[in-house]
Amino acid sequence: MRVAGLGLLLACAISAVSCGRGGAGGTSSCLYTFASGPGDQPPADATSCREWKGASDQVAARQQDCDSAAGPADGGITVHSMFSEGPCPVANIAGGCRDTVGGITYTDWYYGPNLPAVEVAAACAEEGASFVPAP
């Protein structure tokens, strides 16, 4: 699946994410995996992960929005999500797209050993976000 498709699916899955104002604070994240077909289990590795920095007063809202993103999505895809009060995992990151909304900076990280960073960079440009290379 192309990164642009993942970006669109991720955007649809987390459209309710709270981006309210808040003070500086820690890092939290929501890890997403996608399964196709009924009864399929999500892959062991991450597909994408949204990581927020700052506004620690928004952690509860982020967790609720992350939890609510799980479930069936368009095209028979099932979204699995897992919230963490820490950063996204770094193994197999191909790159990320960073943006700031309402004073809160977030990075959407994309994973895959066969996902070229140039595809992630192109998806970031389409979204109007800044490309961030893998750490």
Image: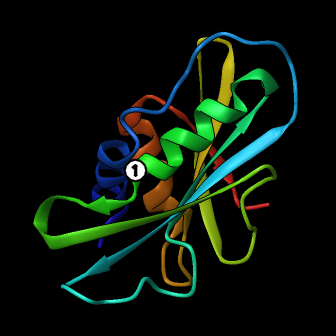
**What percent of the width, then of the height, locates residue 58?**
69, 25
Relative image position of residue 56 (x, y in whole percent): 81, 27
- Vertical relation: 53 (above or below) 135: above
Residue at the image position 30 percent from the left and 54 percent from the top: 9
Q: Which corner quadrant of the image does residue 54 belong to?
A: top right
Q: Residue at x 59, y 11 (%)?
A: 102
Counting from the top left corner in percent of width and height, residue 131 is at 59, 43
Q: Is residue 63 positioned above or below 90 on the image?
A: above
Q: Who is closer to the viewer here, 83 or 122?
A: 83
Q: Residues within 10 Å of mark 1 (few under 14, many from 20)?
A: many
Q: Quadrant of the N terminus?
A: bottom left
- Residue drawn at point x = 82 percent, y = 13 percent: 23
Q: What amino acid is found at the position of numbered circle 1 in the picture?
A: Ala
46 with respect to 86 (left or right): left
Residue situated in front as seen by the camera: 50 or 57:
57
Q: Residue reaching furthest right?
A: 25
Label 1: element kind = helix
| 41 or 134: nearer the viewer | 41
Q: Residue at x 73, y 76 (%)?
A: 91
Which residue, given by chain and number where applicable, does mark 1 sit on? 69
Residue 96 place in picture, x, y as percent? 60, 51
The C terminus - image quarter: bottom right
Question: Which of the colour schemes (rainbow, by chain, secondary structure, one colour) is used?
Answer: rainbow
Q: How many marks?
A: 1
In depth, the one of 39 and 86 nearer the eye is 39
**As drawn, which residue projects farthest toward the left?**
75
